Image (cartoon, grey):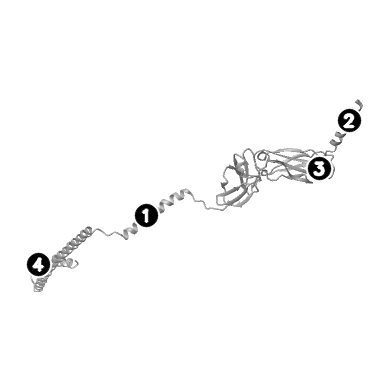
């Protein structure tokens, strides 16, 4: 009886040894490579394994494990879009050869923690003293935008002169997708790149986008502040001059009547003064002519007396006549 029991134990051990020895070695270095929330399962060929190995990879979902890659000869399997960027998902792979297979190797994948965020897409417009950048998030392999996967999403921008690639002029971290960067030296060529930085992680930088900014004429604010008031003053003086030379509003009738009467009075006074002055001069001139005629007679008589040997009694009248002749010349010039 005891001998029979020992035979049964040895037979069971041999059967178990045969079953264990028929299992294949499992894949080595099983890892998940995640880019933009995607999941690619990779592994290495196990040691001491036959050359005709194939592999099966599965992902556990709501209904249990589902096969994604079945009997593939590759050493990787794209697990496709995961249901969500939040939570954790179990991925597994095993080796197979005919009817033999290996045990499963499982890994836990957390998309928001394991993934690498790719570079964003940039739209860049270079202007005179600034550059406008519009940032577009990378396309994810999960439903929903990037802001549903992280509590905070930021963007880091770097720009430099194209001829100085090792000298970054500024690195700016912003939360907006539309950014304006001020250029220190307009007219030169600049390059810009950006990356997405979710909360607690760093993304990959985009390829540099290069372009040349426009040159501008810089106007001094002091010149502008001086030219503006001066132009306003010139315009105001011109307006006032035109209004003065071409008045639009006529004088009030009462003022026009007053000015007309004043002008008429002034003209009448001037005419009366002229008439009075003319009459007075005429009287004086007539009187002078009359005296001049008398003097001519006197002088002729006096000349006759001198010729006849007279004693020159007319010397007094002669001097008076000379005086009248001088006044006559003066009044003739009036």
CA gap, disc 2 and disc 4: 200 Å
Mark positioned earlier in the residue sequence (1 or 4): 1
CA gap, disc 3 and disc 1: 97 Å
Residue carrying label 1:
236
Which disc, if any, is residue 96?
3
Query: Residue 271's spot in the image, x, y percent?
Result: 17, 64
CA gap, disc 3 and disc 2: 32 Å
Query: Residue 197's spot in the image, x, y percent?
Result: 62, 41
- Of residues 21 and 48, the one drawn nearer to the viewer in this rendering: 21
In what element is the residue under mark 2?
helix
Quadrant (top left, top right, bottom left, bottom right) of the N terminus:
top right
Quadrant (top left, top right, bottom left, bottom right) of the C terminus:
bottom left
Is the residue marked by circle 4 packed among few (<14), some (14-19), or many (20+) residues within 10 Å? some
Discs 2/4, front: 2
Which disc, if any, is residue 8?
2
Which disc, if any, is residue 317?
4
| 76 relative to 237, above or below | above
């Amino acid at each position: 009886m005891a001998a029979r029991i020992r035979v049964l134990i040895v037979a069971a051990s041999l059967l178990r040894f045969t079953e264990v020895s028929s299992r294949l070695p499992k894949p080595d270095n099983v890892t998940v490579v995640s880019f933009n929330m995607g999941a690619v399962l990779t592994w290495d060929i196990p040691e001491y394994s036959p050359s005709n190995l194939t592999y099966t990879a599965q992902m556990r979902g709501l209904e249990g494990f589902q096969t994604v890659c079945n009997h593939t000869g590759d050493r990787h399997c794209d697990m496709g879009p995961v249901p969500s960027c939040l939570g954790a998902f179990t991925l597994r792979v095993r080796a197979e050869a005919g009817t033999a297979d290996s045990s499963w190797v499982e890994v836990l994948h957390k998309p928001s923690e394991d993934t690498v965020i790719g570079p964003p897409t940039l739209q860049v417009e270079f202007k005179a003293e600034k550059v406008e950048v519009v940032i577009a998030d990378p396309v994810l392999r999960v439903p929903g935008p990037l802001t549903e996967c992280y509590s905070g999403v930021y963007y880091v921008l770097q720009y430099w002169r194209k001829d100085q690639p090792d000298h970054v002029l500024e690195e700016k971290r912003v939360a907006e997708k539309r950014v304006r960067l001020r250029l220190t030296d307009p007219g030169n060529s600049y390059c810009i790149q950006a990356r997405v930085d979710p909360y607690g992680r760093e993304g990959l930088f985009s390829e540099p986008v290069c372009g040349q900014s426009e040159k501008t004429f810089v106007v001094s604010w002091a010149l502008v502040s001086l030219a503006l008031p001066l132009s306003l003053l010139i315009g105001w003086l011109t307006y006032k001059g035109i209004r003065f030379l071409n008045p639009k509003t006529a004088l009030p009738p009462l003022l026009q009547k007053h000015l007309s009467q004043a002008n008429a009075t002034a003209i009448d006074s001037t005419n009366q003064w002229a008439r009075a002055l003319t009459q007075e001069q005429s009287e004086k001139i007539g009187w002078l002519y009359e005296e001049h005629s008398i003097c001519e007679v006197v002088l002729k008589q006096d000349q006759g007396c001198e010729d006849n040997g007279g004693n020159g009694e007319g010397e007094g009248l002669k001097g008076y006549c000379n005086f009248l002749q001088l006044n006559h010349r003066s009044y003739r010039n009036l």
